[in-house]
Image (cartoon, rainbow, N blue to C red):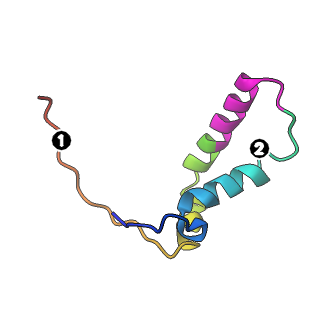
Amino acid sequence: MVQLPSYAPDLNPAEGIWSLLRRGPLADVAFTDDDHLERTLRRGLRYIQHRPHLIDGCLAGTGLTLTHQPTTPRRDQ
């Protein structure tokens, strides 16, 4: 886990994701209702999800890296 300052948009990978959405599926769209907005957001996020190089680019812009750590199965209590 990396502790970020309270306001550091340049260090926040989510800002890169929002930037991709704003320049892509959300660009120049007048949403007709909440469902239209939600469908468009989901479609855009799904597009990004299936293109790891886009996510890697958002991380690279922050200088942060992900390290894969094996997970242990959670036991229900």
Q: Mark 2 = which residue?
A: 25
- Above or below, 28 relative to 35: below
Left or right, 19 with reference to 3: right
State which tag comes first along the sequence, 2 or 1.
2
Dominant secondary structure (helix, strand or loop) of the stretch shown in magenta: helix
Q: Secondary structure at mark 1?
A: loop
Seen as rendered, the residue at the extreme bottom is: 63
* Residue 35 on image: x %, y %: 71, 23
What residue lies at 78% left-to-right and 23% top-to-bottom? 33
Which sits in the foreground, 70 or 38?
A: 38
What residue lies at 78% left-to-right and 44% top-to-bottom? 26
Badge 2 amino acid: Pro
What residue lies at 54% left-to-right and 72% top-to-bottom? 62
Q: Give me the disc on residue 46.
A: none
Quarter of the picture containing the C terminus is: top left
Q: Give me the disc on residue 73.
A: 1
Quarter of the picture containing the N terminus is: bottom left
| Label 1 CA crowd tier, 10 Å (few <14, some 14–19, many 20+) | few
